[in-house]
Amino acid sequence: MEHNKKKEIETASQGNEQFPGEVHDLPGGGVVISSFNEIINWARSNSLWPLTFATSCCGIEMMSVASSKYDFSRFGFEVARATPRQADVIIIAGTIVNKMAPVLKRLYDQMADPKYVIAMGACAISGGPFFYNTYSVVKGADHVIPVDVYIPGCPPRPEALLHALITLQQKIKSGLTREQIRVEKPQS
Amino acid sequence: MNNEEIKQHIIPILPNAVFEETGDWLQVQVEVSEWKQFTRWLKSETLQMDFLFCLTCIDWSATATGKTLLTMVYHFTSTVFRHTLVVKVKLDRNNPEIETVSDDWRTADFHEREVFDLFGVRFLHHPDLRRLVLTDDFEGHPLRKDFEDPVNMIKL
């Protein structure tokens, strides 16, 4: 576990990734030495299934990222699930209103562990343009569920969402998502 | 039918109606007491207003213009004649009550629930007058100018 903490978080722009561990070449083949945790994190980060969830215009950008021009399947996000029970990551794409908040909480609770959350756009981060003088909007989705990665923008460019998705992958590989840290704490 | 013809049809029915012709559509102000009778006439007789395409409310609070009233605004059109009429009804802001039109135009059912929800106008004889968009336990009517909610409303 400790070597996870030493690592710096690689940003997406630096992202040079390889299989975690050391390769020892031997005659007739080779041996890979690695920690099981790192292999699991590596595997999980490369197959993140997003939940089909969008509440406003950020959803259009999310669809754009799913389609052929940007295509997040290149990074292992292609299997968008219509049920939270099969999803690993929820991209909060849009405004969360007070009536939607319990629904979002319920969706999050239904997702199986390990689960990750991306807050996409100004509304999901802080209420955005609805921060002032609104009786109906939750001022940031992190009032309802914990968030791993925030993307600013109104709405963010598709590249920004890709950046956030890759950042989430880097975070998982480093063992630094909120959930991974929570699991580690009782042991130390 | 053009605006002038519509006007000539309305005058015998409502001799003391007030007309406004500032926009493309003819606007007429109707008293609450004459309202229900007038809508029946609009739908069935000469004008055949069979489509209510907008129903909303305006809060003229004391802070805005010195008036303290709510104005109901109805946009009617006729799919037979292709003419349009805007009807406005002034209501007492402290006790806003008006007869429902959801029996004549079914679309008014939800629109009136929405106006009840956000402005607190009570529609008499409405079949199911409950809050529509807000939660049932919401307090107050948020589109009124004097709506205060210090928890959720962050004022600049």
Image (cartoon, rainbow, N blue to C red):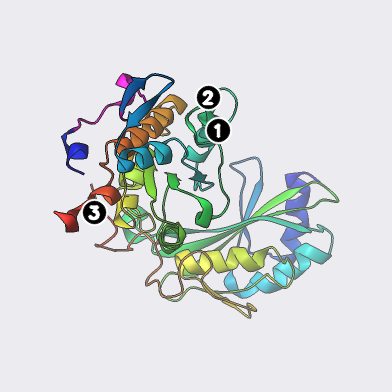
**CA distance separating discs 2 and 3:** 33 Å
Query: Of tags 1 and 3, which is closer to the observer?
Result: 3
B63 vs A17, nearest the viewer: A17
B29 vs B129, nearest the viewer: B129
Rendered position, B118 above or below A52: below
Residue B72: x percent and y percent?
55, 62
Q: Is residue A72 left or right of residue A184?
A: right
Q: Which residue was labeled with disc 2?
A: A70
Rendered position, B35 above or below A156: below
For badge 3, the amino acid type reads Arg
Q: Residue at x 66, y 48 (%)?
A: B26
Q: Which residue was labeled with disc 3?
A: A182
Q: Quadrant of residue B101?
A: bottom right
For badge 2, the amino acid type reads Tyr
Task: Tell me the element at label 3.
Answer: helix
Q: In this picture, which residue range is highlighted in magenta? A: A7-21
| Residue A157: assigned label | none
Residue A21: x percent and y percent?
30, 29
Q: Is residue B96 left or right of residue B26?
A: left
Q: Residue at x 27, y 27 (%)?
A: A10
Q: Which residue was labeled with disc 1?
A: A66
Residue B28 makes an appearance in the image: yes
Rendered position, A33 above or below A144: above
